[in-house]
């Protein structure tokens, strides 16, 4: 009996242990309580220079945790950035705009409007206009943005078909800045409509200045398909000069490819890790002809070929802002 | 490959023959079964033209274990499973697997060891394979396929987990103060490295028990789930040590045996090397007292426990059922081809829903099948009383049993208001053959009513929670003649109400609450015949009709008629 009493005494000693008494998880009042706006939607600046790394902070404070959305729309470009979150506050952590774009084209130096919405509460608000004095600068090697015309060392070819475009167009709707490259035409005797090659020598070096690890290199390009086009084939080819002789030998050196078909209409960002590029023969994966090693530091030419089934008639796409980035894909 | 299988089979048969020649130093043991079934799906849902109405299948398998005993202190067993799915022919559909392999023996006359496959458990708070509420109570129809699942997955009656590793047990005897000290140690691997981001994950521990006398024993347990650093490129290492102490006092007053037991301990769950992961530490205590009156065959157990909200013990909190899986049969149904929710019919017959290995953290659970203690007795954030009463007639003519748990949150979830959890069931079994003094006939009937309520009332309406589960189970076993029995069962399960179910992040911390609402019931009515060739060999033919009725129309209601043929044998 003494032992049972001892056991009970020990138990009581243990029972007296304390632990924290905070509630577990988010407070229910933050989720299900009445919605009130404690601090109205606001922005820290009305003029912003993204090129210097400045960021824009939006602020607001609610009585409860809600799913919110901030939509920033460029008045000239129509570019849209969407910030979303689930929180009680919009602050320098949850609602920051670094000048990037969610829906292309990319923002220009323009005036933007910003709107806040909380759909579940039917709440919307806006702030006074924001002026982008300078757009975001993306780190990486820009192959082509078409802002300064055609580089004479680029190689352009177009078939003698009908309605052939293959030229630079200046328009506010450009994927980036003010110009894009229009590739279009109707060729009823060949798949190839035309091409534009970007050799590394056009930039004053035998190879593009890229790091050697293909896992860290991303190829990015903005492409646009007009409404009604269904037959486009865009083929990007990446030729490596493995022996360093300045000439690409098709039979003995690697060429990797990226083929795009049935892309969405409108502007979109294509980003591919260099290591994920494949050798293709007639669109099907094949063994590369060289050493089979992805060597971005030996990339000597990027080729863009625009093709379509000759029986399907006219085809067209736009291309803009071809850039290699390191460590991460382009955040336009 | 087919030739190789044949060679192995021939070798096994030769070894089996040798067993008789070598005075049973080599012998074969194992099990065999043949299963055939057919499902017939019906629904009142309009225009369900997509779901196939009938399916059928089955398999035959044999587990052949070769036991080799080269000396009296050494036993080696290797068991292979040969399985042929219904319809397989000449090797098509045949699988050939190693089911288990172990070596065990006694070293130096005192050290017991086992290498390879081991079944292991410690206590309810350190390492135990807990059975969920939905599987807690046996049924004569539902128990047949469930028994095969348990056999396949090495779920044992004493709640062990099947592990692969090594275990040693030894004991020391003393002349003074204590009589004996028992030591048990084990180490197992629960996950292999991927040589990239996941280290080998090991589970190790042990226990020491000091037996002072028949009246007092005490000791401690330790279990630790941990990543073995250096076996991959990962720089973050999971650590989940659990330490507990136990004490048990036995005392007899006249015809009453009293036993008081205490287990208390603490746990820590951390991801060493991670700057963002939390460190979760907490403790628990569990005190219970049991009284047994031998002359009346009555026992009463009452206990109180308090398990902290951050108590984490992978070996004790891993649930058998993985509720994030979808059932194998009729996985998608209806014209929308929605994933069919797990039903109790699936729980009893679908082995793919079950886990075979312990898992860190807290897994998602289904509030229908146990909202109060989904992680067993070690469910965190629970405190309260439990009572169990057993009363059996001394002539074994009848038996009654009742159990209840009155628990509440230790700390409120999202509010200071606490949820109260009440679980209770009452069972009565009547052995009519004993009452009527029929010596060679079985005639048993039993019934159980159970309930589980979860309630919370707060100042605000959104704090209120009211979820009620009700279940019933009736069983009948009656001898037709000889060894042929008629068996029948009716089981009903219903859950109605609302709950805010905690959603947890990868570190098992609550990050949100999901609104859960249910008004459904499911029932199973089955009957069959079972013929016992011997205690270990049975043939059963069963028919059952299962109904799923969702009043809220969140899922499509349906009915499933099923027939089963089970031949099971152990040797």
Image (cartoon, rainbow, N blue to C red):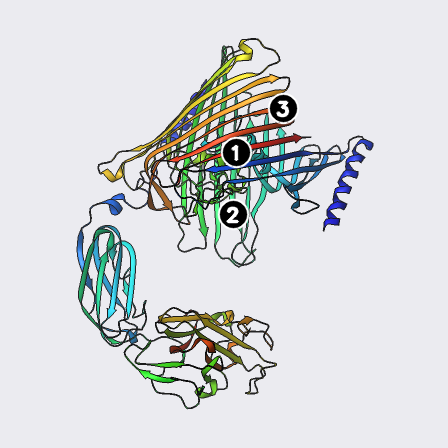
Question: Residue tagged by mark 3?
Answer: B531
Other residues around mark 2 within 10 Å, as few (<14) / some (14–19) / many (≥20)? many
Q: Residue furthest right?
A: B21
Question: Residue tagged by mark 1?
Answer: B562
**Element class at badge 3:** strand
Query: Disc 3 vs disc 1: Cβ atoms closer than 8 Å?
Result: no
In this rendering, does residue B85 appear at all?
Answer: yes
A169 or A186: which is nearer to us?
A: A186
Query: Disc 1 vs disc 2: Cβ atoms closer than 8 Å?
Result: no
Q: How many angstroms separate mark 3 from mark 2 (CA)? A: 48 Å
Q: Is residue A235 left or right of residue A134?
A: right
Question: Residue tagged by mark 2?
Answer: B226
Mark before the other along the chain sequence, 1 or 2: 2
Q: Residue furthest bottom?
A: A152
Mark before the other along the chain sequence, 3 or 2: 2
To which chain does the residue with label 2 belong? Answer: B
Other residues around mark 1 within 10 Å, as few (<14) / some (14–19) / many (≥20)? some
A298 or B255: which is nearer to us?
A: A298
Other residues around mark 3 within 10 Å, as few (<14) / some (14–19) / many (≥20)? some
């Amino acid at each position: 009996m003494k032992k049972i009493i001892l056991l009970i005494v020990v138990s009581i000693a243990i029972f007296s242990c304390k632990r924290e008494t905070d509630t577990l998880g988010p407070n229910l009042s933050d989720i299900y309580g009445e919605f009130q706006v404690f601090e109205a939607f606001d922005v820290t600046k009305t003029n912003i220079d993204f090129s210097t790394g400045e960021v824009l902070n939006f602020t607001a404070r609610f009585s409860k945790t809600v799913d919110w959305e901030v939509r920033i729309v460029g008045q000239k470009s129509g570019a849209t950035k969407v910030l979303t979150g689930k929180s009680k506050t919009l602050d320098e952590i949850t609602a920051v705009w670094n000048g990037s774009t969610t829906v292309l084209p990319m923002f220009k130096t323009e005036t933007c409007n910003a709107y806040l919405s909380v759909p579940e509460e039917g709440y919307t608000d806006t702030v006074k206009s924001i002026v982008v004095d300078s757009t975001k600068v993306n780190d990486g090697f820009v192959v082509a943005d078409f802002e300064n015309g055609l580089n004479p060392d680029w190689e352009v070819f177009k078939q003698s078909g009908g309605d052939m475009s293959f030229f630079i167009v200046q328009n506010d709707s450009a994927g980036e800045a003010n110009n894009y490259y229009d590739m279009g035409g109707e060729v009823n005797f060949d798949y190839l409509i035309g091409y534009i090659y970007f050799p590394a020598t056009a930039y004053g070096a035998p190879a593009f200045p890229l790091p050697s690890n293909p896992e860290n290199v991303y190829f990015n390009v903005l492409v646009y398909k007009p409404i009604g086009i269904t037959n486009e084939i865009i083929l990007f080819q990446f030729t490596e000069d493995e022996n360093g002789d300045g000439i690409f030998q098709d039979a003995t050196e690697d060429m990797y490819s990226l083929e795009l078909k049935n892309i969405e209409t409108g502007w979109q960002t294509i980003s591919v890790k260099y290591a994920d590029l494949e050798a293709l023969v007639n669109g099907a994966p094949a063994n590369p002809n060289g050493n089979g090693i992805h060597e971005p530091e030996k990339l000597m030419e990027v080729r863009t070929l625009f093709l379509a089934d000759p029986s399907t008639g006219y085809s067209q796409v736009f291309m803009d802002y071809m850039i290699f980035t390191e460590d991460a894909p382009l955040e336009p | 490959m087919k030739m190789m299988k044949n060679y192995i089979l021939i070798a096994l048969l030769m070894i089996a023959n040798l067993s008789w020649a070598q005075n049973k130093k080599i012998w074969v043991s194992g099990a065999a079964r043949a299963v055939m079934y057919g499902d017939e799906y019906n629904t009142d849902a309009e225009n369900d033209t997509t779901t196939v109405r009938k399916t059928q299948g089955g398999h035959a398998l044999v587990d052949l274990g070769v036991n080799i005993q080269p000396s009296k202190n050494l036993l080696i067993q290797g068991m292979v499973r040969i399985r042929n799915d219904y319809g397989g022919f000449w090797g098509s559909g045949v699988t050939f697997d190693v089911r288990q392999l172990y070596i065990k023996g006694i070293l130096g006359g005192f050290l017991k060891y086992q290498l390879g496959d081991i079944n292991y458990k410690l206590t309810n708070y350190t390492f135990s394979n807990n059975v969920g509420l939905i599987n807690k109570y046996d049924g004569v129809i539902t128990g047949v396929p469930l028994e095969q699942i348990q056999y396949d997955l090495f779920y044992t009656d004493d709640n062990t987990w099947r592990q692969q590793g090594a275990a040693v047990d030894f004991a020391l005897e003393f002349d003074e103060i204590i009589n004996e000290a028992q030591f048990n140690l084990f180490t197992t691997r629960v996950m292999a490295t991927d040589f990239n981001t996941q280290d080998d994950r090991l589970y190790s521990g042990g226990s020491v028990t000091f037996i002072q006398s028949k009246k007092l024993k005490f000791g401690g347990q330790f279990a630790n789930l941990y990543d073995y650093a250096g076996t991959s490129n990962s720089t973050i290492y999971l650590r989940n040590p659990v330490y507990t102490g136990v004490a048990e006092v036995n005392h007899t007053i006249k015809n009453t045996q009293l036993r008081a037991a205490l287990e208390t301990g603490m746990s820590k769950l951390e991801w060493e090397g991670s700057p963002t992961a939390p460190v979760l530490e907490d403790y628990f205590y569990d005190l219970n007292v049991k009284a047994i009156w031998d002359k009346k065959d009555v026992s009463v157990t009452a206990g109180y426990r308090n398990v902290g909200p951050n108590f984490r013990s992978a070996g004790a909190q891993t649930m058998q059922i993985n509720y994030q899986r979808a059932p194998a049969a009729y996985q998608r149904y209806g014209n929308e081809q929605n994933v069919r929710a797990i039903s109790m019919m699936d729980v009893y017959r679908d082995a793919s829903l079950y886990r075979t290995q312990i898992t860190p953290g807290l897994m998602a659970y289904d509030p229908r099948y146990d909202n109060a203690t989904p992680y067993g007795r070690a469910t965190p954030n629970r405190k309260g009383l439990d009572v169990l009463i057993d009363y059996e007639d001394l002539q074994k003519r009848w038996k009654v049993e009742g159990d209840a748990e009155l628990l509440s949150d230790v700390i409120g979830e999202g509010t200071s208001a606490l949820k109260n959890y009440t679980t209770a069931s009452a069972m009565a079994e009547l052995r009519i053959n004993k009452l009527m003094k029929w010596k060679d006939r079985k005639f048993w009937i039993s019934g159980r009513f159970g309930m589980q309520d979860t309630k919370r009332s707060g100042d605000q309406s959104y704090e209120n929670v009211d979820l009620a589960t009700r279940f019933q189970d009736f069983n009948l076993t009656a001898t037709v003649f000889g060894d042929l029995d008629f068996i029948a069962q009716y089981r009903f399960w219903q859950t109605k109400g609302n709950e805010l179910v905690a959603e947890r992040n990868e570190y098992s911390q609550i990050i949100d609450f999901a609104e859960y609402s249910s008004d459904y019931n499911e029932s199973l009515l089955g009957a069959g015949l079972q013929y016992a060739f011997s205690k270990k060999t049975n043939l059963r033919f069963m028919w059952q009709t299962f109904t799923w009725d969702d009043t809220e129309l969140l899922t499509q209601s349906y009915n499933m008629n099923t027939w089963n043929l089970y031949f099971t044998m152990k040797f």
